[in-house]
Image: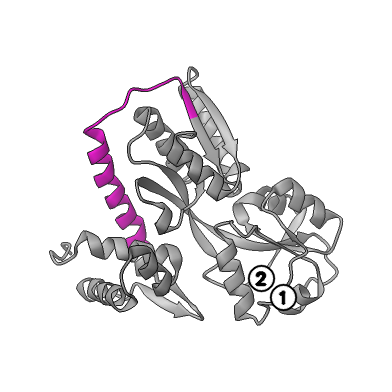
Amino acid sequence: MIMHPGIKLRHLRVFLDIAARGSLTAAARAQGITQPALSRTLAELEALLQVPLFRRERRRLVLTDAGTLLRTHAAAALQMLESGVAALHPVAGTDRLRVGILPTAATRLFPRVALRFREMHPHVTLSVETGPHPHLIRLLREGGIDLMIGRMPAAADMAGLRFDHLYEDQIALVSRAGHPCWGQPVRDVLSACPVILPPQDALIRRAVDDYLQARNLAGLHPAFETAALAVGRGILAASDALWFISQGVVGDELDRGALIQWPTDAGFLTGAVGLTRRQVGPDNAMLDVLTRLATDGTRT
């Protein structure tokens, strides 16, 4: 099927914004248009494609299978256009790449990619900065880092940036193995045990808050807030606490059996992980190599 000539860039930008935020209201605010206007644009796109792109799950809009497929290709298409524009004004390279790593990519994805990159380009130093999303976004915009690896930023933060999608990462609810309440209803356990939430400025916090609200736990007061593996792992090991955290952060602990994952039955507890960079920045050739290695690494 050939792409319908009526599909415009505005349709795709609106679609990607809604997919990132899960809310018409939030997407309309970010786009600077009214919600009815944004709804009409989405309806136009679905009519042109002849498929529904979202379904409503409680208070959020969740991608359908068709929507998930379109997001991958639409994001890639827009990024290719932006790359083409950036290629018209290449910038000279250096022997150092400054990379910002969010927790979800720090324990599994990035170490593999970094070691492979080192084998291919031993003359290039990877200088790694860690920290919360707002800190790394600020560094990226100011030129303090050349690339950020982790969750997809909100649409409001994407002006002048590009995002290369790698994979979908689930938000997991985890505890130490042998938790005494294992097998009991999750809602009851969350009400009875200490809970660790992601920090307020973490990209996954909104989805976790929505999950708790949907289960009448909006008033739950967290005992701790952290996305740091060492801190969360230590608290879980010494208590009956449960932790909402990106699965990428605790994947190795789950594989080893040190932590267990509780069922949440919530499809919206997931999000895109990838590489965020300035549309025009230093040493684009090396950044492209790192992007390709990361993409290849998620397919193996």
SS at badge 2: loop
Few, some or many C-alpha atoms within 10 Å of disc 2 (few <14, some 14-19, many ≥20)? few
Residue 78: x, y in percent?
Answer: 28, 51
Going by the picture, which residue comes out furthest to the top?
123
What's the magenta region?
A: 68-97
Instruction: Identify the amino acid type marked 1.
Output: Val
Residue at x 27% of width, y 29% of height: 90
SS at badge 1: helix
N-term-proximal mark, 1 vs 2: 1
Closer mark to the observer between disc 1 and disc 2: 1
Magenta residues, dominant SS class: helix
Taking 262 as reference, is 140 above or below it? above
Q: Which residue is mark 2?
A: 263
Few, some or many C-alpha atoms within 10 Å of disc 1 (few <14, some 14-19, many ≥20)? some
Q: Is residue 85 magenta?
A: yes
Q: Is residue 26 magenta?
A: no
* Mark 1 touches mark 2? (CB < 8 Å): yes
Q: Give the CA separation, mark 1 to mark 2.
A: 7 Å
Instruction: Identify the amino acid type marked 2.
Output: Pro
Taking 147 as reference, is 178 above or below it? below
Q: Which residue is mark 1?
A: 186
Residue 247: x, y in percent?
Answer: 62, 56
- The colour mode here is one colour
Residue 91 in view (yes/no)? yes
